Image: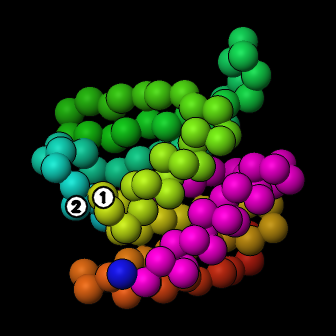
């Protein structure tokens, strides 16, 4: 599997969190074991423990939410991409990044102006 583009995508995600330019992220094209899971939506949320990453696992009939600190959140995204989720959209204040991983493991990373 071509992991170079996945590594770039995850690095941009971590950089956007560090530089406070992160807006939101969506992981889609799910091909994992959970038959009901459709996509994963990630955004920032303020909690008593400070700013966290809010992971919303969108399923057919219900949603599941989890909060992670930045380090754990980046590790989770890195683990999911290319294994369970084969598409990712990262929205930052500087650029929009779109990652697509094909069935044969070939990946493509597009960078566009922010929307």
Q: Nearer the viewer, residue 59 or 32?
A: 32
What stretch of residues is rendered in magenta? 2-28
Mark before the other along the chain sequence, 1 or 2? 2
Q: Quadrant of the N terminus?
A: bottom left
Place residue 112 in its image quadrant: bottom right
Q: Is 40 situated left or right of 102 in this image?
A: right
Q: Check whether the beta carbons of the residues at disc 1 and disc 2 lie within 8 A of each other.
A: yes
Place residue 90 in its image quadrant: bottom right
Residue at point 48%, 65% (across, down): 88
Count how many numbered circles sit on residues in the image. 2
Residue at point 74%, 29% (across, down): 51
Q: Is 56 situated left or right of 11 in this image?
A: left
Q: Residues within 10 Å of mark 2 (few under 14, many from 20)?
A: some
Residue at point 86%, 53% (across, down): 19
Q: Quadrant of the C terminus?
A: bottom right
Residue at point 72%, 16% (across, down): 49
Looking at the rendered structure, which numbered label has been put on residue 84?
A: 1
Image location (x, y in percent) of residue 109:
55, 82
Q: Nearer the viewer, residue 42 or 12?
A: 12
Asked if one can make out residue 115 in the rendered structure from this viewpoint, the answer is: no
Looking at the rendered structure, which numbered label has been put on residue 50?
A: none
Display coloring: rainbow
Task: Name the residue that disc number 2 marks.
Answer: 31
Image location (x, y in percent) of residue 69:
64, 32
Query: Is residue 12 covered in magenta?
Result: yes
Q: Secondary structure at mark 2?
A: loop
Q: Please tell me whether residue 98 is drawn above or below residue 54 in the rendered image.
A: below
């Amino acid at each position: 599997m071509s992991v170079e583009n996945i590594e770039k995508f995850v690095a941009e995600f971590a950089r956007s969190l560090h530089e406070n330019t992160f807006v939101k992220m969506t992981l889609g094209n799910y091909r994992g074991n959970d038959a009901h899971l459709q996509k994963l939506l990630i955004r920032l949320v303020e909690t008593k423990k400070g700013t966290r990453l809010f992971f919303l696992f969108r399923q057919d009939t219900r949603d599941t939410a989890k909060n992670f600190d930045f380090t754990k959140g980046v590790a989770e995204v890195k683990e999911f991409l290319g294994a369970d989720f084969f598409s990712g959209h990262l929205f930052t204040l500087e650029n929009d990044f779109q990652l697509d991983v094909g069935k044969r493991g070939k990946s493509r990373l597009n960078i566009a102006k922010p929307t």
